[in-house]
């Protein structure tokens, strides 16, 4: 049970403030939810990513780890407190060096660097590394950020290049200032005007299981803050979505069968405290755990994950040219086998957004890399015409292909459509990792021959790709890899094939190059 609210007075960006909240609340939540300062970001809520870094009594601190009860008499500075009548010298250096790319890590980077520069106006590169080491960036590779911190003192301006000299010149990002002063709106920063409901997804704890849902009536009666429990039967249109017109295989809510750990089985809609406090094991869900299909067993498993994918083969790719057998016989050759694992995109911004019903239209405001594809899929899920769906993309705090697929949008839209109230959904970090796509694990065998000049003469290649529970972008990966298997070389004889296999692992999808790396 939450502790009672207590008054806490502190200084925030130079102004005295008093909040009346439970003392155990995280400073990051109070800044964002109670004080409206959404410049402080939440990437993990666990002290790992540094996106929430603020100054606490002039030293950097993770706001997600600071209980507000500790703050009596303290001084807090957030990114909103840096720019006074224009960007400060550090923010201008970030702009000059292109150090804010997606921008989700930028507030944390600025606060950590501000702490350093206040104590040491001319740090060494090693000191910058040390000071910024607690803030993760998935976009920049850190170089531009480090260069910006080292260059604060120069205060150089960045004039537009002369006519004829623009190619190769560095220009300030057109949306750079908003990423630097904390005003940029990412998925979790955008809020509806009217009071909203919160949605929490209940997910399968098993990689492969049948399940039945019991009567939620007693739970609804016992928890007035719980407004509705959504199940597969509540999806107004088609309870399947996917990237390809002929490959829609992913349910918005699983219908009696969970195909990976993290598959959504129902959704709780209500006030934020109630849906967060309800334990999954208190819900009337009965599980029958099944043997999971793995990358090792996919080809021989007695059961297929999907009826349309016999042998658990989603698709095959093939590029063939010339006589590979002859080419390999005729020259010295080498065989390489390699295996890669799942890779998580680990964008700093977990998926987030809200939806609201506007008459006979639905409007969804969320982080996405593909607003038009989202619109088309949401229309099918809701049983609406495309003109009835409006997708408003927020800034994206890193995507790398992982936000090409739908995430929060379908359930937020279904709930808002049915309940006629705005509904908000923000993934936690563990949920983001469990529920969204990854880079395909691969098992690759390649055999290449070369002539005495070292020129490739023949290549035989086969790759198996673990596409997980649902198709997502698997066909693109399986079809693109054979095309690229021989690299940029003119190889007279090539036999390159791929197979994408379904397993009870998380769905694999797009990740910087659709399998080509
Ligand atoms: S360290 Fe606080 S949100 Fe990640
Ligand atoms: S700019 Fe650092 S995470 Fe995107």
Image: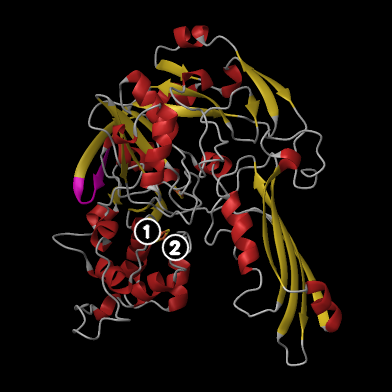
The stretch drawn in magenta includes residue 363: no
**Where residue 460 appears, x then y in whole percent?**
76, 69
Instruction: Please report the residue visible at 37 percent of the width from the left and 67 percent of the height from the top.
Output: 116
Is ligand 2 within 8 Å of the beta carbon of the residue shown at mark 1? yes
Q: Nearer the viewer, residue 228 or 240?
A: 240
| Res. 195 visible in picture | yes
Q: Which mark is residue 416?
A: none
Left or right: 154 as drawn, with respect to 276: left
Residue at 63 percent of width and 53 percent of height: 440
Marks 1 and 2 in Cβ contact (< 8 Å): yes
Magenta-tinted stretch: 9-15
Query: Left of 148 or right of it: where is 319?
Result: right
Query: Which residue is outermost to the left?
Result: 85
As displayed, is residue 386 above or below residue 43? above
| Residue designated by label 2 | 139
Q: Residue at x 65, y 21 (%)?
A: 211
Q: Which mark is residue 102?
A: 1
Among numbered discs 1 and 2, the one appearing first in the sequence: 1
Q: Tell me the SS state at disc 2.
A: loop
């Amino acid at each position: 049970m939450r502790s009672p609210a207590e008054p806490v007075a502190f200084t925030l960006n130079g102004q005295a403030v008093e909040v009346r909240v439970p003392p155990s609340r995280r400073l990051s939540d109070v800044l964002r939810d109670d004080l409206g300062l959404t410049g402080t970001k939440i990437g993990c809520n666990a002290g790992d990513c540094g996106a929430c870094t603020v100054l606490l009594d002039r030293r950097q601190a993770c706001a997600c780890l600071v209980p507000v009860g500790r703050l009596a008499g303290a001084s807090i500075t957030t990114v909103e407190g840096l720019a006074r009548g224009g960007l400060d010298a550090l923010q201008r250096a970030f702009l000059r060096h292109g150090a804010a790319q997606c921008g989700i890590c930028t507030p944390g980077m600025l606060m950590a660097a501000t702490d350093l520069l206040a104590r040491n106006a001319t740090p060494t590169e090693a000191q910058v590394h040390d000071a910024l080491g607690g803030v993760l960036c998935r976009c920049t590779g850190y170089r531009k950020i480090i260069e910006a911190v080292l260059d604060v003192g120069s205060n150089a301006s960045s004039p537009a290049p002369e006519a004829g000299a623009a190619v190769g010149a560095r220009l300030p990002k057109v949306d750079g200032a908003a990423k630097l002063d904390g005003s940029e709106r990412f998925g979790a920063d955008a809020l509806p005007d009217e009071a909203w409901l919160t949605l929490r997804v209940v997910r399968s704890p098993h990689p492969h299981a049948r399940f039945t849902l019991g009567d939620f009536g007693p739970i609804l009666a016992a928890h007035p803050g719980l407004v509705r429990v959504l199940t597969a039967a509540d999806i107004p249109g088609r309870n399947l979505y996917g990237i390809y017109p002929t490959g829609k295989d992913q349910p918005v809510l699983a219908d009696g069968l969970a195909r990976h750990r993290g598959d959504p089985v129902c959704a709780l809609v209500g006030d934020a405290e109630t849906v967060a406090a309800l334990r999954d094991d208190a819900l009337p869900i009965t599980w029958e755990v099944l043997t999971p299909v793995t990358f090792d067993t996919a080809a021989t498993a007695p059961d297929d994950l999907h009826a349309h994918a016999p042998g658990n083969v989603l698709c095959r790719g093939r590029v063939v040219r010339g006589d590979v057998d002859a080419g390999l016989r005729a020259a010295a050759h080498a065989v390489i086998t390699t295996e890669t694992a799942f890779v998580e995109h680990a964008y700093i911004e977990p998926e987030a957004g809200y939806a609201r019903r506007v008459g006979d239209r639905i409007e969804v405001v969320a982080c996405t890399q593909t607003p038009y594809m989202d619109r088309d899929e949401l229309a099918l899920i809701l049983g609406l015409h495309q003109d009835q769906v409006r997708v408003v993309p927020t800034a994206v705090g890193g995507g790398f292909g992982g936000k090409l697929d739908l995430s929060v949008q379908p359930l937020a839209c279904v709930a808002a459509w049915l309940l006629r109230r705005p509904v908000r959904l923000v993934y936690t970090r563990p949920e983001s990792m469990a529920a969204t796509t990854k880079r395909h694990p691969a098992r690759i065998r390649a055999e290449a021959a070369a002539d005495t000049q070292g020129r490739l003469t023949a290549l035989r290649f086969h790759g198996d790709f673990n596409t997980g529970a649902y198709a997502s972008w698997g066909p693109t990966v399986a079809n693109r890899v054979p095309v690229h298997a021989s690299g940029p070389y003119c190889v007279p004889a090539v036999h390159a094939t791929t197979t994408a296999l379904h397993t009870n692992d998380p769905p694999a999808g797009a990740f910087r190059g659709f399998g080509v790396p």
